[in-house]
């Protein structure tokens, strides 16, 4: 038995020293996985030096007109909600390390006196079977860590998608303000002209009132659009993780383009199930639950055996060394509760996986349909812009020939502005739908490209 105990100590030290992936190794692995799906290099802020490096990078990127690419870059390195999820990797990796450690031996000491006799004893208890369960616990810890890595990777891709969408919202809102400002200036000039004409008796009061009403509507529209722009910009700021003077950045003025029509290649659902990280994480969860059920089954009746070494000495007597074993007797607790629980957890994880697969398939179909129809709507608005531009040009000719009044000209200018803003919003909706579609396909950017 002594040899067995010695072996137990040696094995415990051996298992404790087994190599385990560090938190940085796991993060780098996740970094490579998401980089291939468009996230670029991620940064896990864990020191003041890394904090300073991220701050400098953010400041540098904000000095330039902010592009979509840089907005995504800033979000992925500076968003603290995302940084918070990285700590899940640290927690799971720590759990894995803990799973490879044997329970500490218990050292006991007792002393007693009576009848002129002094008695003392020392005991050492070691949970012997704990040694045998270490490989199983490490296997479970490894699966949990892999599940966490995939789950965090999915959060990165969700954040990437959200950064794109909030950036597009901010761009559309700001450009809408500029389009309306042009019309507002035109209305101001027209109102001044109409007032002079009315004063000279060349324009009726009714026409002046109509022009004043157009100007009032243009001003109200300006207020509404500025409000939407401020809200959209703040939504972007939250994702960027910036505040104070950092929020005075300018947005890029590169025109938003419609891009290519999405293509249905007949295999989008299969592509999504193959590449979605949340689905891969759910698969790992099923694997974990199956292993956990097997672990509970093996340890149901005999989960702990303790080897006890003792040394006792009484006054005037020789020291007595002893060795003993404590084995739990499975009379009341036969592990039925744990077995039932792990089986239910396994069934739950399987049902969750099937449900997620159904939802992902539906999300793909919905995302593709949304992108496809948003593209068609944005295309139609291109035609509508051309028509309204031609109408405005004709009205300008009528106005120059004194066949139309200022009111008709302003009305057509307003319709032309409205069409351009609606077209801009349609392009934005299409680009946001594209971001949703790419995410539902697990970051496969080229899956719907022609």
Image: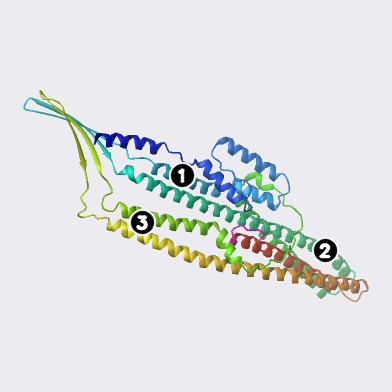
Residue 105 horizontal/vertical position (percent): 29, 36
- Label 3, secondary structure: give it: helix
Which circle marks residue 186 in the picture? 2
417 relative to 52, above or below: below
Which circle marks residue 293 in the picture? 3
Q: Residue furthest bottom?
A: 403
245 relative to 160, above or below: above
Residue of label 1: 93
Separation of disc 3 and disc 1 at Cα? 22 Å
Q: Is residue 185 left or right of residue 172?
A: right
Q: Earlier in the sequence, mark 3 or mark 1?
A: 1
**Residue in the image at 31% along x and 43% along y:** 130
| Span highlighted in magenta in the image | 440-446
Separation of disc 1 and disc 2 at Cα? 64 Å
Residue 16, image quadrant: top left
Q: Is residue 417 left or right of residue 138?
A: right
- Label 2, secondary structure: give it: helix
Q: Is residue 209 visible?
A: no
Residue 361 horizontal/vertical position (percent): 55, 67
Does residue 63 show up magenta in the picture?
A: no
Q: Callout 3 environment at 10 Å: few (<14), some (14 to 19), or many (20+)?
A: many
């Amino acid at each position: 038995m002594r040899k067995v105990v010695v072996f137990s100590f040696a094995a415990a030290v051996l298992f404790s020293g087994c190599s385990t992936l560090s938190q940085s190794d796991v993060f780098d692995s996740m970094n490579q996985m998401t980089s291939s799906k468009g996230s670029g290099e991620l940064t896990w802020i864990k020191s003041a030096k890394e904090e300073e490096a991220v701050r400098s990078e953010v400041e540098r990127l904000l000095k330039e007109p902010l592009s979509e690419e840089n907005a995504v870059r800033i979000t992925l390195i500076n968003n603290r909600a995302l940084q918070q999820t990285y700590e899940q990797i640290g927690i799971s990796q720590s759990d894995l390390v803990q799973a490879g450690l044997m329970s500490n031996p218990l050292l006991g000491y007792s002393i007693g006196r009576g009848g002129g006799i002094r008695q003392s004893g020392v005991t050492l208890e070691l949970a012997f079977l704990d040694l045998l369960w270490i490989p199983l616990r490490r296997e479970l810890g490894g699966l949990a860590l892999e599940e966490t890595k995939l789950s965090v990777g999915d959060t990165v891709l969700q954040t990437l998608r959200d950064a794109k969408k909030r950036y597009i919202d901010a761009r559309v809102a700001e450009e809408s303000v500029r389009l309306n400002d042009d019309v507002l200036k035109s209305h101001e000039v027209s109102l001044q002209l109409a007032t002079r004409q009315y004063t000279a008796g060349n324009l009726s009061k009714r026409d002046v009132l109509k022009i004043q009403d157009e100007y009032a509507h243009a001003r109200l529209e300006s207020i509404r659009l500025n409000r939407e722009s401020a809200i959209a910009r703040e939504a972007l700021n939250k994702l960027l993780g910036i505040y104070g003077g950092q929020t005075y950045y300018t947005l890029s003025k590169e025109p938003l383009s419609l891009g290519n029509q999405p293509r249905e290649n007949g295999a989008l659902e299969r592509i999504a199930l193959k590449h979605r990280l949340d689905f891969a994480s759910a698969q790992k969860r099923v694997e974990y639950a199956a292993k956990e059920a097997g672990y509970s089954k093996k340890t149901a009746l005999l989960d702990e055996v303790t080897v006890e070494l003792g040394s006792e000495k009484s006054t005037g007597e020789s020291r007595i060394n002893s060795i003993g074993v404590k084995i739990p007797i499975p009379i009341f607790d036969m592990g039925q509760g744990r077995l039932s629980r792990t089986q239910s957890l396994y069934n739950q994880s399987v049902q969750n996986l099937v449900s997620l697969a159904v939802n992902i398939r539906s999300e793909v179909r919905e995302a593709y349909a949304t992108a496809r129809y948003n593209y068609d709507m944005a295309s139609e608005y291109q035609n509508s812009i051309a028509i309204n531009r031609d109408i405005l040009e004709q009205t300008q000719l009528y106005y120059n020939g004194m066949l139309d009044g200022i009111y008709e000209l302003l009305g057509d200018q307003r319709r032309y502005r409205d069409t351009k803003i609606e077209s801009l919003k349609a392009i934005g909706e299409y680009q946001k739908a594209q971001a949703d579609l790419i995410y539902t396909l697990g970051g496969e950017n080229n899956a719907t490209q022609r």
